[in-house]
């Protein structure tokens, strides 16, 4: 998959996510690694986002995935940060870390991967894992993106927002 993504398209996806979350009375929390805060920045650029966006955690360094998000340190030591289970644990962890009054955010979203310019721990540039945690479901999706560092990061934001929308649109309105 090439990573050419239009910035306007990314913003429109963010508008759709915020609108759908607002309509459903749901909240979202975001854990980011390779995107470095771009996902939550795009979400909060939408007017009204404060009603649904709990916040974001940028856990760029591997050890922060454990200390800030609760990812199993042994899993990180064994598999490294570019791993579907790491993404799932990041998504679930951020739901709880950014929840309120002892309750998690309704949705946790996570991004981890290699934006480049060099491979990381044997993983090629463009290998990305996303995860969404919603209710009892925690699902990861792998991507193989092409392009330069900026386009990989932008495509990851776009794919992340689409992943959330898929989960929202597949769920009945409560």
Image: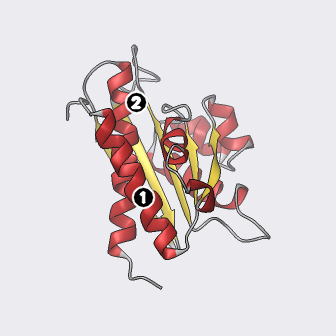
The N terminus, quarter of image: top left
Judge the density around disc 1: few (<14), some (14-19), many (≥20) Cα neighbours within 10 Å. Answer: many
Q: Is residue 56 above or below residue 135?
A: above
Between circles 1 and 2, the one closer to the viewer is 1
Q: Is residue 15 above or below residue 126?
A: below
Tell me where residue 172 sits by quadrant. bottom left
What is the secondary structure assignment of the residue under circle 2? helix
Residue named by callout 1: 17
In the rendered structure, the answer to whether residue 97 lies left or right of residue 76 reads right
Residue at 58% x, 61% y is 52
Sequence order check: which comes first, mark 1 or mark 2?
Answer: 1
**Viewer-side residue, 139 vs 85:** 139
Tell me where residue 53 sits by quadrant. bottom right
In the rendered structure, the answer to whether residue 71 lies left or right of residue 41 reads right
Q: Which mark is residue 137?
A: none
Q: Position of residue 91 (x, y in %)?
A: 55, 54
């Amino acid at each position: 998959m090439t990573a050419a993504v239009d910035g306007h398209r990314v913003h429109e996806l963010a508008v759709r996510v915020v609108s759908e979350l607002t309509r459903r009375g749901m909240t979202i929390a975001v854990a980011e690694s390779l995107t470095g805060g771009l996902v939550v920045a795009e979400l909060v650029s939408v007017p009204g986002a404060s009603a649904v966006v709990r916040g974001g955690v940028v856990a760029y360094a591997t050890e922060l995935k454990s200390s800030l998000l609760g990812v199993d340190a042994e899993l990180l030591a064994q598999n490294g940060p570019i791993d579907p289970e790491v993404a799932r644990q990041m998504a679930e962890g951020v739901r709880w870390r950014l929840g309120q009054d002892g309750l998690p955010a309704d949705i946790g979203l996570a991004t981890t991967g290699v934006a480049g310019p060099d491979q990381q721990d044997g993983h090629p540039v463009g290998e990305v894992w996303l995860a969404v945690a919603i209710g009892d479901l925690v699902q990861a999706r792998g991507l193989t993106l092409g392009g330069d560092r900026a386009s990989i990061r932008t495509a990851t934001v776009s794919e992340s927002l689409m992943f959330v929308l898929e989960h929202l649109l597949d769920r009945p309105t409560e």
